[in-house]
Amino acid sequence: MSPAPNNHEFQEWWNKQRQTNHENSDDSASHLLTVEISSPGADRTVGKDRSRSARQLSWVCLLKFQQIAASVASITNSFVGLIRTANRRIASPDSPADSASSRLYRVIKGFLIFVLLLLCIELVAYFKGWHFSPPSLRSAEVVGIVYANWLHVRVNYLAPPLQSFTNLCIVLFLIQSVDRVILVFGCFWIKFRRVKPKAAMEYKTTSSNDEEEGSTENVEDYPMVLLQIPMCNEREVYHQSIATVCIQDWPKERMLVQVLDDSDDIDVQVLIKAEVHKWQQRGVPIVYRHRLIRTGYKAGNLKSAMSCDYVKNYEFVAIFDADFQPGPDFLKKTIPYFKGNDDLALVQTRWSFVNKDENLLTRLQNINLSFHFEVEQQVNGVFINFFGFNGTAGVWRITALEECGGWLERTTVEDMDVAVRAHLCGWKFIYLNDVKCLCELPESYEAYKKQQHRWHSGPMQLFRMCFVDILRSKVSVTKKANLIFLFFLLRKLILPFYSFTLFCIILPLTMFLPEAQIPAWVVCYVPGIMSVLNILPSPRSFPFIVPYLLFENTISSEADLVTYEKESEPLLSTTTGLHRSASESGLADLTKLGTSKKTGKRRRNRLYRKELVIAFILLTASARSLLSAQGIHFYFLLFQGITFLVVGLDLIGEQVS
């Protein structure tokens, strides 16, 4: 009779009890005792390990099953929440930000009805087998005769002009892609050769010890600088914008801060006046200006400020929108570049975004704007000495502003207008990529749309105004060609023209008119390469390259839609019969959502009709491409349709409970 097996679990409990009762005893002796008791035989140890492994395996499987169940439940809850959110926004009142009376919206909606009708026809043809053996005009079925006539019209009358238009857009697409590649290579050359503007002098940064001992620098070495802060109803940020400008490391007797307040809210005016008075008591030369007749918005505001008699005593003017926060050494890093460069009109600094990681919308904007500043602005500044003024975070030579005519209220892009006129007068610009000025990105899609409308609603209007002046100017033929073909036609007209038209109109149409084709490399490969090039200037954003590839066309199309819309109210009439441009101070639109909290106005996410209709157009075209087994086109249309749907339901930016 074999002996009964030992109770290993009892032995383990006994060992633990002995260890607890003899905590102060010798560790080595306790270890030896434990080994003697818990190791009666090799065979029993193997059996124990096997039994424990089985129990552990069952617990691990149960834990994995629980984790899978929790993940499925989380995904289900997220999907249900998404459906509920979409249903609530669809059932909510119409958004004033996307009016149904818009002419562009009616055109897009008509296009959706048209493609839905075509999809119904193609579904009937698919189930009839006519995709493989089309019916003849002598078919016995009435539906077959109708479809045969449709094929005849499609092949002979609709497909040829569509293919010609497609080829034109492809050519424009290639031109724009080549331009982008050249810019990227230019940026690589600048980085490799370490090319950057050089200042003829350098100001010493004032430290706390210098303030206590007294600086030995001659104050006369510092030119007179005017610092302007145009603002309009900036309740949220007026104090920080004024503070960052007032603490500039510059002799106080050689600077003057102008707070140019266009607020129509009396409470905001009182708050800003109190802030200005506080800094006046601290010895900062600062003045408060408020116009009684608010014409021209930002352009009119700046023009009015430059008309003051004391401006003639100043040599330079630095401009900061209300949401910008320059560093204390901003003037000491920019003014030295004017020394010895008598033909230099503008020193522009780079924008740096404090909220770029706030949500997916701000991350995508940071990628696009990083390419604009790192590549476009820097390359144009180094090789051409010209680029469009960004409207803020820059220093102008006042003489250059006066020579080119100053601020004009004739267009919605007054900053681009003054830059072009100064360039035509022979002045040069410098871009400083290493000097950064903090600002904020719009965190909601509503604020983003308003920003894009300000930025893109006026370039072609300006081009019509400046075209004759460009031809008559005394600048070289090369600079004229750059202004006309690259600056205006390519980057302000061709890019919006081909992007929205090619991917949101022509591509869906080619699914229903397969005789007109768009090559796969136009749909997939080249846009993918361009997207990778776009993300290179912001390497920390590489983890978000997949969302960027999906949302790039969707976000960029907002600027394209603006160019297609009627340039509504470029000059808004006032009750006095005067005209005002539609360009406001930088944060006026971006902080309205935040201001609404204090005014009692309820915030909520919007529903954007144009984006939703485009989403359904793309999804309808993806269904048609699935019928014809066009793989790349199907996936592109499907994912683009989904991203437009997400944007149309306002699920990409800041979410409001």
Image (cartoon, rainbow, N blue to C red):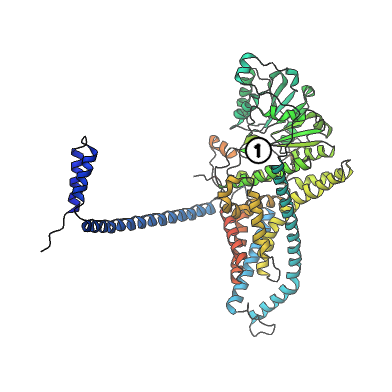
Q: Disc 1 marks which residue?
A: 351
For label 1, the crowd category at 10 Å Cα-Cα, with few meaning under 14, some 14 to 19 and many 20 or more, is many
Q: Quadrant of the N terminus?
A: bottom left
Q: Is residue 406 visible?
A: no
Q: Residue at x 80, y 23 (%)?
A: 312
Q: Is residue 555 visible?
A: yes
As displayed, is residue 250 above or below residue 42? above
Q: Foreground residue, 12 or 534?
A: 12
Relative to residue 94, is residue 579 drawn left or right? right
Q: Within the image, what quadrant is residue 376 found in?
A: top right
Q: How many marks?
A: 1
Q: Foreground residue, 67 or 25?
A: 25
Q: Secondary structure at mark 1?
A: strand
As displayed, is residue 603 above or below residue 289? below
The x, y position of residue 307, in whole percent, is 78, 27
Q: Residue at x 85, y 46 (%)?
A: 478
As displayed, is residue 604 above or below residue 297? below
The x, y position of residue 109, in whole percent, is 64, 59
Q: Foreground residue, 325 or 306?
A: 325
The x, y position of residue 126, in whole percent, is 59, 76
The x, y position of residue 167, in whole percent, is 75, 63
Q: Within the image, what quadrant is residue 633 found in?
A: bottom right
Residue type at the position of mark 1: Trp
Residue sticking out furthest to the left: 1
